Image (tube, rainbow, N blue to C red):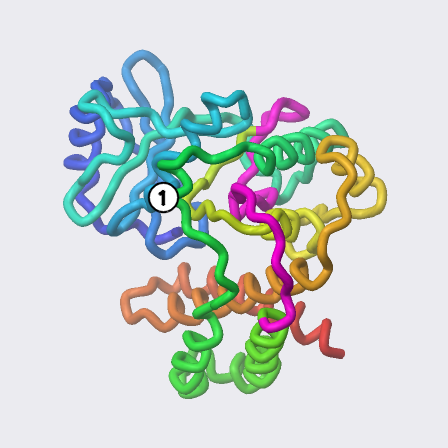
């Protein structure tokens, strides 16, 4: 989220210092991410260490708290897991928010830079290992299970009248509204045609923006906010779609990915469903965010940029 959460940052810094036993010297807001319910800070400490702090309004899902550490303990080294507070647990309550604290990794995300050849192989290796991990009974109970019952279409239909009447979105809706309603129908149709497939642990947002690396160094996988038990195509969609990152997959990169992941022939109906549903869900999220009365001009402009990018891709696919 690029707008600050409106919390008292001095109280936040003191809370982090107390909960994790750190000598906090600085708290730097990071205007990153598109989740309207989450915010990020860099935490600086007196010994020169840095940490990544994530705030979420409400609560993190049980899977977001439990899964990363579970995977790390089983040798999935790319996972960035939260650091337990001094009192135990992982998530810490701060008023209307929960906090998770992570190690800070330099290098930034690979959304714009893209992956090197070596990193494409590691990307495949990571997902291949993730998809073969057997969840514990506790994790199985904590993780949601795929149902193919998306709420995105109903949210779109609810927001459509407000978007059409909005000074900010009126022209956009006039140009793209019909295509977005058609996208909703496509999602419903694809959901009716998917067949049963084995469920595995899925990250569920494994695009290059959630892969961090310093140069050609090892990958660090972040943003474990929404893991799910689902067919592997839930994750593979991010690999084989051209929607995510400035350097999407091509024939060469696909071969490198398969070298790491192993032989794979994804189900094309599932890939289409997940790609279309993600587009629809993002559209509904961005519409809701733009229509919030408290949204800043900068936040609205950023959301409209991404909303338009999705709408243009949907329109291009129809033509």
Residue 109 location (% of width, % of height): 56, 37
Q: Is residue 153 above or below residue 24?
A: below
Q: Is residue 268 above or below residue 155?
A: above
Quadrant of the image occupied by residue 256: top right
Residue 4 location (% of width, % of height): 30, 49
Quadrant of the image occupied by residue 181: bottom right
Which of 16/87 is in front?
Answer: 87
Is 214 positioned to the left or the right of 154 in the image? Answer: right
Q: Residue at x 62, y 47 (%)?
A: 232
Is 176 positioned to the left or the right of 98 in the image? Answer: right
Was residue 209 drawn as part of the magenta stretch in this picture?
yes
Secondary element under disc 1, as helix, strand or loop, is helix
Determine crowd level at label 1: few under 14, some 14-19, many 20+ residues with C-alpha closer than 10 A. Answer: some
Q: Residue furthest right?
A: 251
Q: Residue at x 53, y 79 (%)?
A: 172
Q: Which residues are magenta?
A: 192-219
Q: Residue at x 52, y 82 (%)?
A: 173
The total of numbered circles placed on residues is 1
Residue 278 location (% of width, % of height): 55, 61
Residue 4 in view in this figure: yes
Residue 63 location (% of width, % of height): 38, 41
- Mark 1 lies on residue: 142
Is 68 positioned to the left or the right of 315 in the image? Answer: left
Was residue 144 drawn as part of the magenta stretch in this picture?
no
């Amino acid at each position: 989220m690029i707008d600050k959460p409106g919390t008292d940052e001095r109280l936040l810094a003191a809370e982090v210092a107390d909960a994790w036993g750190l000598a906090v010297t600085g708290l730097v807001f990071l205007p990153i991410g598109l989740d309207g319910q989450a915010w990020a800070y860099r935490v600086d400490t007196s010994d020169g260490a840095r940490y990544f702090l994530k705030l979420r309004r409400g609560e993190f899902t049980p899977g977001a708290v439990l899964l990363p550490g579970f995977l790390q303990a089983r040798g999935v080294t790319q996972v960035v897991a939260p650091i337990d507070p001094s009192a135990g647990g992982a998530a810490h309550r701060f008023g209307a928010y929960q906090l998770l604290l992570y190690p800070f990794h330099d290098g930034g995300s690979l959304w714009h830079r893209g992956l090197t050849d070596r990193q494409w192989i590691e990307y495949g290796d990571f997902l291949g290992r993730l998809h073969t991990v057997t969840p514990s009974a506790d994790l199985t109970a904590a993780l949601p299970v795929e149902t193919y019952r998306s709420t995105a279409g109903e949210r779109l239909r609810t927001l459509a009248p407000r978007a059409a009447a909005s000074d900010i979105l009126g022209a956009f809706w006039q140009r793209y509204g019909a295509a977005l309603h058609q996208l909703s129908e496509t999602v419903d149709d694809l959901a009716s045609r998917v067949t049963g497939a084995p469920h595995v642990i899925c990250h569920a947002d494994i695009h290059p923006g959630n892969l961090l690396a310093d140069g050609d160094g090892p990958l660090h996988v972040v943003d474990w906010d929404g893991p799910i038990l689902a067919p592997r195509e839930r994750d593979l969609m991010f690999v084989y779609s051209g929607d995510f990152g400035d350097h999407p997959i091509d024939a060469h990169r696909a071969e490198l990915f398969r070298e790491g992941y192993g032989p794979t022939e994804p189900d094309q109906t599932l890939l289409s469903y997940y790609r279309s549903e993600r587009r629809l869900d993002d559209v509904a999220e961005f519409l809701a965010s733009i229509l919030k009365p408290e949204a800043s001009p900068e936040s609205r402009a950023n959301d409209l940029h991404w909303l338009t990018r999705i709408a243009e891709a949907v329109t291009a696919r129809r033509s």
